[in-house]
Image (spheres, rainbow, N blue to C red):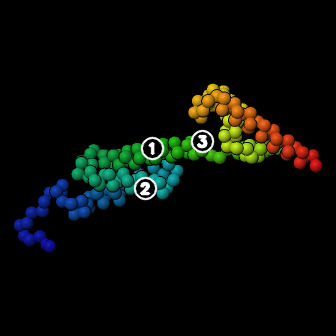
Amino acid sequence: MTPTRGTRHPPAAEQPLLLRPTLEFDDFYAANVRTITGQIFAYTGDRAEAEDLVAEAFCRALARWHKVQDYENPTAWVRRVAWNLATSHLRRRTVAQRFLKRQQEVHEPPPDGDRVDLMRALAGIGERHRKAVILRYMAGLTVAEIAHQEGVPEATVRSWLARGKAALAGRLAVHDEMEER
């Protein structure tokens, strides 16, 4: 559709973004993108990241070009936006790196022979007895606390502990006898 003589175009603000005249913005972009990218690259140390951040800043400028073009220094505005984006990105990256450092796998020395024997012996006794022994002797809970946690009478916990200790003693004794042979 070609305009005919005497046809008036709607103002730029009323035109869809893709139909607006962007020649002015294109010139502004071409004149400033390399300089600002170099500055942001120096700040972030990552060229691809700097290019992305500057592109985002110029996209924001284009979306507001009708206002930004009237600023005393539109280049300073774009630089500030890019710099703010870079600062936010660096902060997020720092927080993520700190989090990942805390999540790194901790390499502990392998358990000694006695610990392996105890773990095997615990694995070989009943679940209730094992849980009672672990809660009492490893977690340091009292008989009353275990009873409350498990919802059983204290006498039941004492029974589990007595049977669990006896089963452990038997399993550990058998293991000691096997080692002596």
Q: Secondary structure at mark 1?
A: helix
Q: Which residue is mark 2?
A: 52
Q: Nearer the viewer, residue 84 or 25?
A: 84
Q: Which mark is residue 87?
A: 1
**Left/right of residue 133 with respect to residue 21 in the rendered view:** right
Q: Which residue is mark 3?
A: 102
Is there a contact, CB below 8 Å, between mark 2 and mark 1?
Answer: no
Q: Where residue 120 sits in the image (x, y, percent)?
A: 76, 46
Q: Where residue 138 sits in the image (x, y, percent)?
A: 70, 34
Q: Secondary structure at mark 3?
A: helix
Residue 160 visible (yes or no)? yes
**Left/right of residue 102 with respect to residue 123 in the rendered view:** left
Picture layout, residue 141 above or below residue 7: above
Looking at numbered disc 1 in the image, what kind of residue is underneath it?
Answer: Thr
Q: Nearer the viewer, residue 139 or 103?
A: 139
Picture layout, residue 117 above or below residue 15: above
Picture layout, residue 52 above or below residue 150: below
Chain-order first, disc 2 or disc 3? 2
Q: CA distance from mark 2 to mark 1?
A: 13 Å
Q: CA distance from mark 3 to mark 1?
A: 23 Å
User: Badge 3, how many Cα within 10 Å: few under 14, some, many 20+?
Assistant: few
- Which quadrant is home to the N terminus? bottom left
